[in-house]
Amino acid sequence: MSDKRVITEEEKGLFEKATGKEFTRRSFFKWASALAGAAVASGILWDDKLGLFREASAQEKSLKEGEWINSNCNMCGGQSGIKVKVVNGRAVKIEALANPVNVANISTNYETVINELGSLYNDKDCAARICPKGNSGLRSLYDPDRLKTPMVRVGERGSGKWKAISWDEAVTQVAENLQKIKDKYGAESLVWFSEDHSFTHIQQDFCKMYGTPNYHNHANLCDVSRKASFKLLMGDERPLASFEDTSYALVFGWNPLGAMKWTHLPGTWNRGRAKGAKMVIVDPVYSQTASKADEWVPIRPGTDGAMALAIGHVLIKKELINKAFINEWCVGFDEYAKYVADKTPEWAEKITSVPAKTIEKIATEIGETAKAGKPVIIDTWSGPGHHTNATLGGYAITNLCALLGMVDKKGTMMNPSKKGNTHHAIDVDLPSLKKPRVDGKGTKYILGHGSGIYVETRNAVVEGKYWSPDVTPPKAGMFVFQNFVMSVPNVKKNIEFLKKLEYVVVNDTHMSETAELADIIIPGSVYLERYDYTGYWVTWPVLGLRKPVVKSVINGMTEVEFVMALIKKMGLKDKNGYSPADLSYDAYYADEYAPTPYSKEQNWETYKKSTLAMTGKTEYEKFRKDVKMPDEGSVDEKTGVVKEKPGKDGKAKAVGLKVGDKIVKGFETPTRKLELTSTFLKKNNYSGLPEYSDPEDKPTSEFPLHLINFKQAEHTHSRTFNNDYLMEMKPDNPLMINAATAAKLGLKDGDAVWIESPFAKAKGTVQVTERIHPEVVALQHGYGHWAFGKVAKGSMNKLNKWSVAGTSDGQFLPGKAEKFSGMAVHKEIGVKVTKA
């Protein structure tokens, strides 16, 4: 801004109104700098872009009124802390609120960042961050395409003919129809699908009191194979990487900076690099994280386990393993070492396409780093985890942590001390709950997670083939906050599944592809209208509260209130006469808060205002922690495993490990040690080793390219695609293809193409790039809607250009479940790409 420019009489008047001072040129320019970009109480602000004082707009004025209300985001599963500005009952702005999940996952690092940035800017919330989805939350709250009233189908399923009904009528109709299903086919004929981080307790309570064992949730579509892989090694399902404190991170198939599962990740990653850590990304795609790493290792999809076995081979051959740690805290080393003896880098190169020299170099680097007493991280996520060989491939990766002795130490993979809210136990003893689950969790899928196996349930209904003759075929389905059609691999089978069910209830915010096939639709809430708890995925106990910051925009029920109304209408109680539906909505959440470790420090009313409770600090090497000998407990003289007194079922729970004269916690495995060869797998007639096998659905001569999917921070699964702000950022998903591969196919950037697999053929456009393995093509997940709203289907965006619906990745897939964990397989099929 030049101090020689002409200042108009209007500006002089605005200046005096804004500042209460008499105009002088000197004071004008002094105050201009002080007020740049900031609204003031008088309604006058300095516009730095225009270089003048002007009247604040109505929206700018509103931001100086109202109140800020703390809550937690739910635009994705990251659950960042937020504060929402509410003016006259309307939410007008969302900003980040400092809490661990959007600052740092280690308690000392969290305190350091909060204190340093809080002191620098006089506001600790400056240390926090939210992603594009969190910033766009108001567009979802006030989306004009939201469902506003319950609707019942009056035409053929999928015909689009609906009749609006009241909320009371909707509750009554669903209750009556579910009772009919129960009376005719048995309670176990109801299958239930929900989100994994939203109002799950009340849904599980309903299923128990109704009598169905067939509850599923979204985790099965996300990371259950990773959970299984780490569980085989250490018994803990979700260790967390301490990037900020590490010296070397080797990460397989994860894009923490681009997909941004938790918003602290870019900060912790970059602070770690700033401290000198080396970061290596193994991924078919050169992701945002790869661009901020020291090395990108492109790999054939689904072959990560082979590379990990070769790394293990090098570590043992070069004596770069931590022998003392292995002798003290590991079992199965000799069997593992024998297995990897011939898994050379040259062997792995043929499978993975990663040069043998690169594998040996990385193995040597991590081994020497660990030998020098510096921390190393080895982590794996959905890249290797969404394949048919996921569990054992992941197990080969996780074993590397044990070989180096890099577990639960500062700067390594940390076992979190996570504590959530209380869940009031439902005491029921219904025969139907003892019936076999339709999906084979724990039986056909021996490492099946509590979230169930979506694909198995769907395929069983579509094909009429069940893993056990004792399974009751599903007849009704409840889908809460789930767009099953677009989320589960193989769209065609998903539609067939829904059509085969006799009664379908969908509880969601929009007329989704799944809702179109329902018998009744219950409008869902947006996170800014409801309560929920979030036990943060950090390394010490932290509990966040999501709470309503505005009343329901549609004057509707939240999901919890709807299920409570359903429980009450059906008269469901446990055998002690307890029913969660007897509580008010607020009282239900108050009941889940106390007793908890947090309620000793904050009562419910105080916690509701703060929405954040913490206790304790990050602890290291918890496996060495002393534990007491349990009353009437026992010690296995051969293994040292300490067990409690057997319960009514005759089983005794292991609680520790005797080491010398001490009893310590150990790990949550059968041996209480890290298992390089799995006791559990051996018990189930497997070798127990992290054996490598090729992916089942590799490319063929007809379909020669690997198709994988990926996620980015602009969108969540398939559910944010009617948010116009997010669609303006990323309106479509061109097919990423390597430049050399595109040249061979005669393709140029932006060309329209046909993408074809054995299961589907659809149009797309290509993005020609060097950022992908030459044998691989990739689509961002979640696109290709034909329902869900005008924007999602390809409607006018803010720039008055037609956006593109994009291409659904799920349609091309066979629709399989990984054989151990039941993980839905999202990244494994061969395709051919031809110019359209």
Image: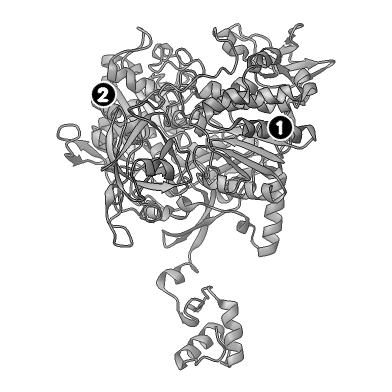
Q: Indicate the amino acid at tag 1.
A: Thr
Q: Residues within 10 Å of mark 1 (few under 14, many from 20)?
A: some
Residue 501's mark? 2
Q: Residues within 10 Å of mark 2 (few under 14, many from 20)?
A: some
Answer above or below: position of 37 versus 663. below
Which is more foreground, mark 1 or mark 2? 1
- The location of residue 225, given as percent across then percent down, is 51, 26
| x 67%, y 22%: residue | 313
| x 27%, y 47%: residue | 793
Q: Indicate the amino acid at tag 2.
A: Leu
- The location of residue 274, given as percent across then percent down, is 69, 51
Q: Is residue 73 left or right of residue 748?
A: right
- Front residue of 524/220: it is 220
- The location of residue 752, given as percent across then percent down, is 29, 46
* Residue position marked by numbered label 1 in the rendering: 364
| x 28%, y 20%: residue | 462
Answer above or below: position of 310 versus 470. below
Q: Is residue 750 left or right of residue 106?
A: left
| x 24%, y 37%: residue | 516
Which quadrant, please, contains the C terminus?
A: top left
Dot 2: element = loop
**Render colour scheme:** one colour
